[in-house]
Amino acid sequence: MASAQQQQQMHMILPGDSLPISETDLKSHRLVLGPGLYTDPKTLTIHPVNAGKLYITQNNNSNRINIHIDYESHRYIPHVNDLVIGCIVGTFADSYKVSLNSFSNSVSLSYMAFPNASKKNRPTLKIGDLVYCKVATAVKELEATVECLESGFGLLEDGMIIDSTGLKFVRLLLFDDQFPLLRLLASRTKFEIAIGVNGKIWIKADEIKDTLACYRSILDCSMCQSVDQFANIIKKHFQDLNTVAAATAATEN
Amino acid sequence: MSFQAETGILTQVDGSSQIQSQKTKIFCSVTGPIEPKARQELPTQLALEIIVRPSLGVPNTREKLIEDKLRAVFTPLITRYLYPRQLCQITLQILSSGESEQEFTQREVANSINATLLALIDAGIALNSMCAAISLAISSDDKLIMDPNDEQLKAAKSVHVLALELVESSTVVKNVLLLDSYGDFNEKQLFDILEQGEISLLKLGKEIRSIVESKIINSNLIIQK
Amino acid sequence: MTDVEETVEIQPISFPPEVFARISPELSLQRHLALGLRPSLRRFDEFRDIEINEDSLSRFNASHMMNEDSQNNILGSNVLKCGKTFVITSITGGIIEDTSTSLDEVDIGEKELLDIVEQEDSLNKYTSVYPVVEVERGRVGACTDEEMTVSQKLFDSLLHSRIIPKDSLKVQTGIRTTDENGVSQIIYPDEVNNVDGNDVDDSYKHVMPRKKWSYVLYAKIVVYSRTGPVFDMCWNSLMYALQSTRLPRAFIDERATDLKMTVRMKGRSTTIREAYDILCDPKKSLPLTLNDSNLAYASSFGIIDLDPEVALEEARKQEDKQEDVEMDKIDSILLADIDTEAEESSIYSTISLINNLKGDFKQLSIIGAGSRITPNMIRNAITLSKCRSQDLSQKIKK
């Protein structure tokens, strides 16, 4: 929905293409570069480095042009304020070593980055625990740090983790209010969910069979071609697991 | 030159592609940026680890030389300074070389370059520009053959691989990334190769582009209601 | 509160040139280039001179002939000195049995078919040597990627250059006969032919083995005190070494000539053929016949953009030359024969070529990872490489 104040253009772009912005616009506006764009440090030219859809948002009221490329990828690179799910892989004297992606450089989670933390009051996370956290610093030359300061962050107990969806799907799930998947799931069962933009989704329902149904539904929905199929996929998985659960209950009796 | 390509086939890596051109068939996977081993780490830029596995037997010096050529092509193409102290691992498995391995590597090198480009884009690794590569041969009657097959390579007086860096929607050639020639040829033929190769590679660049674009459109279907 | 009067002085740190080149090779190179010089003090298009020492290590070299029973198994050699770098190439060999069926065993139809196949595969008539490149770095360990790629590139280039025909590696065997007095004598049928002028061939034909052998050549190339890329030096050294290579004559013992016997074992008869003992003649040798018109020499070039800022700084220093350096135009220059760490590490665009005396190419690689390579740059490189090739070919005494 493009309002009168906001113009938005969409455009397919590949690495090395020229940006569809005029020279005068470039000079007269403040540019805000998002993901997928790179400024050559020597020539100071801006060029796209990823293949995807280019979004140029120009707000007439402020003198600003926002540019970013929406592209699919699988490996997460930390950016400040991102919500992520990490796995504790090591403990040091004053911080945890947290993995956001297998084989990627790990990030650090300080013992002080928890609510009410003090020298005496240490968090009690173990290796292998999952934590929901926010990226606090991310400078590409240095190790990134994450924190669990606000409520809602911290240890994720039990539940299941969905790992093999692309980053784009996770972003849709987290940021697009119109995206129907969560509402469809909610109509079936009560559940807790944590979505990390590093491509991990943690989900937990009261019963294991519902958790499993949610897990399978989300995984299948991430691979299907159209949102119209979501309802059917979810229906199928919940019905399948309900029949299995009923059958097991029957044999036990 | 025509080829079939598919991307995103492997699920356990960040990017992958498969390419088939005539009898040459190559699988490529890309993982990165990941944590490098201490000896690979470069303080200011992305380190590249390229592994070529032959269709038969174990890798030897022949594959090392192919790796060396691929490294020469992709080092300038990747926006390395965006990923300091990181590593990108590119693995190529040749399923079928489509040429006599003892004497030639041209088809494998050209197709590996194209396959790697598609896998890098699939992995979302930042690239400065696009590229395209082709193998060429000059026959015994001095004719220039694009994308020669095994028999044409064997009968050729000279064999070549040309890779060009393409920008501006793959309509402009920015630089020669690689020209690797063996055999008997002269100066005129060399410039012929560069000129004719450029025409073919601009066409090929468009093909690669349309593969990438159709992939983007397909992955976007999910939002449309 | 600090006093306003107090000023902070920033002292520029200065380094001696060698230290500066070490910590900032790129800037050091640019400063040199802005002066019109290279770190090696050569001109842009100047090659290093090459000194060669022909065939001093070889078994068949005149000075070694005194010492006949020496264990020396080097067939051809070359020592090449280029700048500070030494390249020592030694060629050794072996004899293998030809697995392709010898021609007199093949019937005529099959032979025609073979000929057709071979005609289409023009490369099949030529062979290469098996090179091992060792770049000495003062430590032991597994071979480096550079050593492996240079070796493989030498092999490929030599094969595709069509310099060594397979025919010239065929062994023309002789026979050692022992007469009734116990005096051994080695007879080479081709030599006998030449002496008498009449056809004596037939008298030996029945004793000549039906098997065929051919030589294989190995080249060991050792590089000492490497200062830059080594491929062109290794290639040139290999070229010189091959031209000095002599193949030893080989013979078989008379007793071992085609011995056939029928053995009966449990009713089945089998033929056992005696294995030949092929020996090399300690004295006699033949020169290796090469395809002379394809002999070619290598040269390498680098292309680098001149940094306009450094050029401007230099111009400012020279007061008389003011403002005549254009900022917008990026000049790129071609440097011949890349050497020194500064050049190797900051030049990303290279042209490496091997061409013969006529100026035809045998191998060429252009890598454009840095500055733009223009057709003009390629033409300049070709012109320079032709001169270089001419010069290098004259180093060897024919």
Image (cartoon, rainbow, N blue to C red):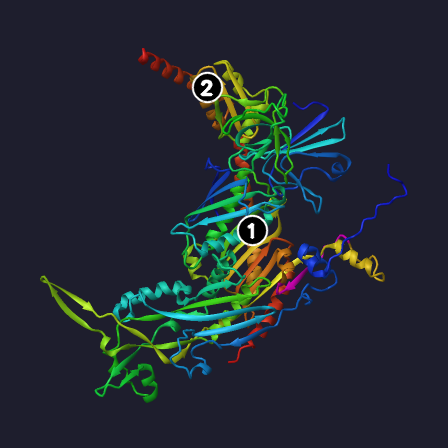
Q: Which residue is mark 2?
A: A211
Q: Residue at x 54, y 51 (%)?
A: B71
Magenta stretch, main secondary structure class: loop
Magenta highlight on residue C331: yes
Query: Both on one chain, marks 2 and 1?
Result: no
Q: Residue at x 54, y 63 (%)?
A: C231
CA gap, disc 2 to disc 1?
Answer: 48 Å
Disc 2 secondary structure class: helix
- List x then y, in percent, for residue C298: 55, 67
- List x then y, in percent, for residue C98: 32, 67
- List x then y, in percent, for residue C284: 37, 81
**Can the viewer see residue A84?**
yes
- In the rendered image, the residue lying farthest to the left is C267
Indicate left or right for B147 with C5 as reference. left
**Can the viewer see residue B224?**
no
Indicate left or right for C245 with C112 as reference. right
Disc 1 secondary structure class: helix
Amino acid type at image mark 1: Val
Residue range highlighted in magenta: C327-339
Please state the total of marks drawn on the protein image: 2
Magenta highlight on residue A161: no
- In the rendered image, the residue lying farthest to the front is A120
- Residue C190 lies in quadrant: bottom left
- List x then y, in percent, for residue A98: 55, 32
Q: Chain of mark 2?
A: A
Q: Where, quadrant-wise, is the N terminus of chain C in this rendering?
A: top right
Q: Which residue is mark 1?
A: B73
